[in-house]
Image (cartoon, rainbow, N blue to C red):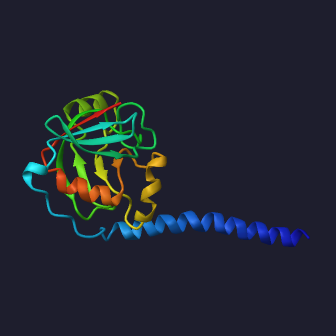
Amino acid sequence: MISKRRKILAVLLALALTVPVAGFAYTKVLGRFGSGTAPAMAAVEQQADKIIVRKGKRELQLLRGDEVLRTYRIALGGAPAGHKLQEGDQRTPVGDYVIDWRNPRSMAHLSLHISYPNEQDVLRAKEANVAPGGNIMIHGLANGWGAFGAFHHLWDWTDGCVAVTNSEMQEIWSLVPNGTPILISE
């Protein structure tokens, strides 16, 4: 009887270890390949000239002038409350930034870089004797995980980035040129 229980426990333990390791490996391998071709930019008159992220509402809005073009539900960093202070704190920064470059072959489906850290962020981190971190992006789901798009916003799973579904990221990519200001608030 005891050996049968031990076998069952051994199988359950093996599964408990194998599934997360396999998921991690799957993500790492697919992250190296990118996730397809980036869409063309929309006509200039259709593009956003401002992005607003409201962390508390888990909402990203694209604006042109005072008109809201699109609104998206988002996921944030695993510890979303408060301003990002240091690398690895899983916080999404708060403040005024700019979309300053884009990556069509990122580990997540497309990505737009947010200009964090700015001068104030660097000074704040220096005073606290920590590294401010960086590579804060608006991005889709991790490559290979797009099928979970309908559920991604149910928890905050990024390392401090702003995540949307892959189809939403395709749209955002085409509507947001480099240089677009982004305001991130609590």
Residue positioned 29% across, 61% down in the render: 106
Q: Residue furthest left?
A: 44
Residue positioned 37% across, 36% down in the render: 55
Which image quarter is the N terminus in?
bottom right
| Residue 177 pos. (x, y %) | 14, 50
Q: Residue furthest right?
A: 1
| Residue 83 pos. (x, y %) | 35, 32
| Residue 168 pos. (x, y %) | 30, 55
Using residue 13 as the reference point, say whether residue 151 is left or right of it: left
**Which is nearer the eye, 19 or 56?**
56
Residue positioned 38% across, 58% down in the render: 141
| Residue 100 pos. (x, y %) | 16, 47
Number of callouts in the render?
0
Say which quarter of the image contains residue 48: top left
Which image quarter is the C terminus in?
top left
Using residue 105 as the reference point, say whether residue 17 is left or right of it: right
**Which is nearer the eye, 104 or 60?**
60
Using residue 41 as the reference point, say whether residue 74 is left or right of it: right
Residue positioned 79% across, 72% down in the render: 7
Above or below, 54 against 88 in this view is above
Using residue 18 as the reference point, say whether residue 8 is left or right of it: right
**Which is nearer the eye, 132 or 73?**
73
Above or below, 79 against 150 in this view is above
